[in-house]
Image (tube, rainbow, N blue to C red):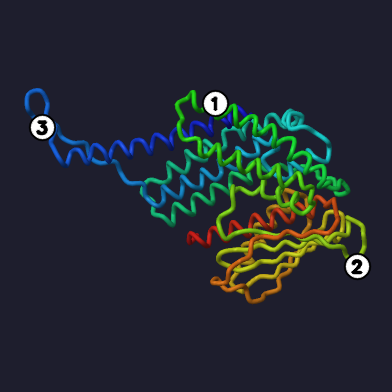
Amino acid sequence: MADININQFLNNALQQQQIRNNAVNSRTVNNAGTNAQPTTANGAANIPKPPAANITPAQNLQMNTLKSIDRAIYAKDLMGVPKNINEFVYMFQRGLSLGQFNAMFASQLASQRNSLSQLQAQILAQLQGMDFEMTSEIVNKQMTAQLQSSLKNLEILSDGMINLSQIAQLIQANGKEALTKLIMTMTQASKMGLTDLSQLKDMAKLINASISVAAENDPAKTMKLLLLLYLPWLPLKKGVDFDLEVTQKNGDDSDSDSILTVTITTINFGTVVATLYLETSNSVQISIECSEKFPKKELDERLNKDEKHYSMNALTTYDVKDSLKPEQKIKSASVNMSKTTEVNPYLLLAAHSIIRHVIDIDNNASIGV
């Protein structure tokens, strides 16, 4: 599976490089044509070729969005983890390797392998004749459809706590293997004639930074690394971030009684704060503090879909308050957490859903969707 996505990643990079080369060549030919008309052997002037079409804002959005999807999928392939976080939890709770997990779901994975190329084809086909707003909406709908179609209804063990120290060890071990794969990929890319290795080098920097953070064995930072890995954007847009904090109910030292607070910094809706705690084994109470203009109904609809996939019950309430003003400078994330080294899987899944959907809603608002 990794080999297929590596080739796909390289092919996409080669196509982008070819587009840039064609644009440069087109400008060179056009500039030369303004100074002199080339002639054929019989003296007839050659008719200059029309200049290449400029890339529209809609096409640029589509390319950047697909590049972000490519990067996020490629990172998970390199790190040797499944595509979706519930799949990761299922695999981790049962001590399975990615190979063992893939063998269990070979037929489903076979249909996923071509999902990105099909997505690209659909978007490219629909781009013709559409304006910026329409294209933006199509791109985001296709992203959501791709994610939803690949989710599986997997049994999550409510008492199978996620040990964050073990997650940190996994990120370090798999990250080192990923760096080795990247070195081999860059060698292969050079042989294929790809001279711009910036995307691969950026990926290496991201993975190397993840290894360094995981080596600190800080539970909060480890949990944030895991959640970042399972967001469909890599990296997050500038000005968007989230913090995590875990405390205990009534001073109890039991990990199962943890309260998880997620603070999400958005561009359009200020700060959104979600407080989560378990009511029963798979039932999560969610209290969200947000601004009046935040689309609460849309978030509820999105969370309800995830609940069905995760076999999770969630009760969400809202506390509407004034948000941070847009002109206020947002401090960089400082993740704080108690000495808790384990987190309940349903708290983790609920936190991931909230972070992903809030950021996606904020992204849509930024492009007018």
Q: Residue 317 occupies which quadrant of the picture?
A: bottom right
- Tell which tag, 1 or 3, sits nearer the viewer: 1
In this view, 183 is above or below 294: above
Decide which of 347, 325 is in the foreground and name it: 325
Whether label 1 touches label 3, CB < 8 Å:
no
Indicate the secondary structure of the residue bearing disc 3.
loop
Q: CA distance from mark 3 to mark 2?
A: 87 Å
Name the residue: 43% across, 37% down: 16
What percent of the width, then of the height, locates residue 115? 57, 37
Name the side, left or right, on which 275 lies relative to 1: right
Amino acid type, residue under disc 3 in the picture: Ala
Using a 10 Å C-alpha cutoff, classify the residue at mark 2 as few (fewer than 14 neighbours), some (14 to 19) or many (20 or more). few
- The residue beneath circle 1 is 187
Amino acid type, residue under disc 1 in the picture: Thr
In this view, 143 is above or below 329: above
Name the residue: 65% across, 57% down: 302
Mark drawn on residue 45: 3
- The residue beneath circle 2 is 250
Question: Which tag, 2 or 1, sits closer to the chain's start?
Answer: 1
